[in-house]
């Protein structure tokens, strides 16, 4: 069987290589404690899973930002291995009750990036994703902030998450007009149960060169159904045409 590290692909049209499997960290903090999280991160990296996906809001069961701190302490304890890891995080979700502490204004994006860098104990974020669209902010303003962070070396690539197809189109059209690379990827909910991404998101990202990856490949409903079926055990179905004795 091939090593998981052999399943590599470029992120969209970029030169960034990521594993086709990544480690999601939404349960770090509250469900997975720090020691277990570090063991999971070690196991993932040892088996070729170089992508670690998180968000500034993750860890909310303890406090918002906790998950980035867990990853940051793991990186700090393993000096020299940062280049082996593709760190992806997200911005846009509310971090407090302060109206300025949410959304995708230029001020918010830059401040949130600085905070994520401190929590992650790193000098750059490989993939900085917008957690959801913010239609109250013009795309020129959003790209202005992202361009600044790229020039400063604080982020490498920009991605989206939970965007509609036409939001991706607007983002890419504005990026093209500003002559910047645009979105490297879209992270969406896509699995055997939830497949609406096939309607517009996946077709729309192809012409723009952005990648598409699933943040929930194993939906909770599908997992619950499988577990319930296993608990019930195998059941024989009546033969076609057989009459009920009831």
Image: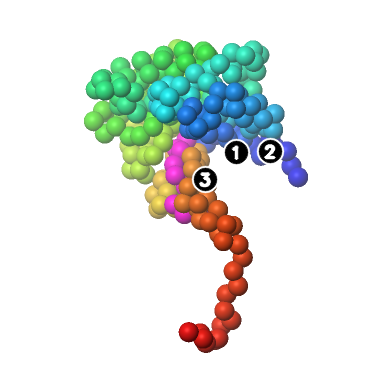
Q: Which mark is residue 103?
A: none
| Rendering coords of residue 75 (x, y %) | 59, 17
Quadrant in which residue 145 is drawn: top left
Q: Rounded to the nearest whole Å, what is the CA distance between mark 2 and mark 1?
A: 8 Å
Distance CA(mark 3)–CA(mark 2): 17 Å
Q: Earlier in the sequence, mark 2 or mark 1?
A: 2
Q: Which mark is residue 4?
A: 2
Q: Which residues are magenta?
A: 184-194
**Which disc, if any, is residue 21?**
1
Contact, mark 2 vs mark 1 (Cβ under 8 Å): yes
> Which comes before the other along the chain, label 3 or label 2?
2
**In the image shown, does 25 or 173 lie closer to the viewer?**
25
Residue picked out by circle 3: 217
Where residue 171 appears, as percent x and y from the top left, is 35, 34
Q: Are marks 3 and 2 in contact (CB under 8 Å)?
A: no
Give the total number of marks visible in the rendering: 3
Q: Secondary structure at mark 2?
A: helix
Which residue is rendered at x = 64% and y = 36% of the image?
A: 8
Q: Residues within 10 Å of mark 3 (few under 14, many from 20)?
A: some
| Residue lying at 42% horizontally and 49% vertically, measured from the top left | 197
């Amino acid at each position: 069987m091939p090593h998981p590290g052999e399943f590599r692909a470029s992120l969209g049209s970029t030169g960034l290589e990521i594993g086709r499997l990544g480690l999601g960290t939404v349960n770090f903090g509250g469900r997975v404690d720090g020691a277990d999280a570090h063991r999971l991160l070690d196991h993932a990296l040892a088996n070729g899973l170089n992508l670690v996906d998180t968000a500034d809001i993750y860890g909310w069961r303890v406090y918002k930002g906790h998950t980035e701190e867990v990853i940051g302490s793991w990186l700090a304890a393993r000096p020299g291995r940062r280049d082996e890891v593709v760190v992806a995080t997200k911005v846009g979700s509310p971090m407090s009750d302060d109206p300025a502490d949410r959304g995708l204004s230029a001020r918010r994006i830059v401040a949130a990036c600085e905070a994520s860098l401190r929590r992650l104990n790193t000098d750059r974020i490989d993939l900085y994703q917008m957690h959801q669209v913010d239609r109250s902010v013009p795309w020129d303003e959003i790209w202005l902030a992202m361009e600044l962070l790229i020039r400063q070396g604080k982020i490498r690539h920009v991605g989206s998450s939970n965007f509609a197809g036409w939001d991706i189109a607007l983002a890419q059209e504005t990026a093209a007009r500003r002559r910047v690379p645009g979105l490297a990827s879209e992270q969406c909910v896509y699995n055997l149960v939830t497949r609406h991404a096939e309607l517009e998101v996946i077709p729309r990202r192809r012409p723009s060169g952005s990648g598409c990856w699933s943040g929930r490949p194993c939906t909770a409903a599908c997992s619950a159904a499988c577990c319930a079926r296993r608990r019930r055990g195998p059941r024989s179905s009546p033969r076609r045409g057989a009459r009920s004795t009831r």
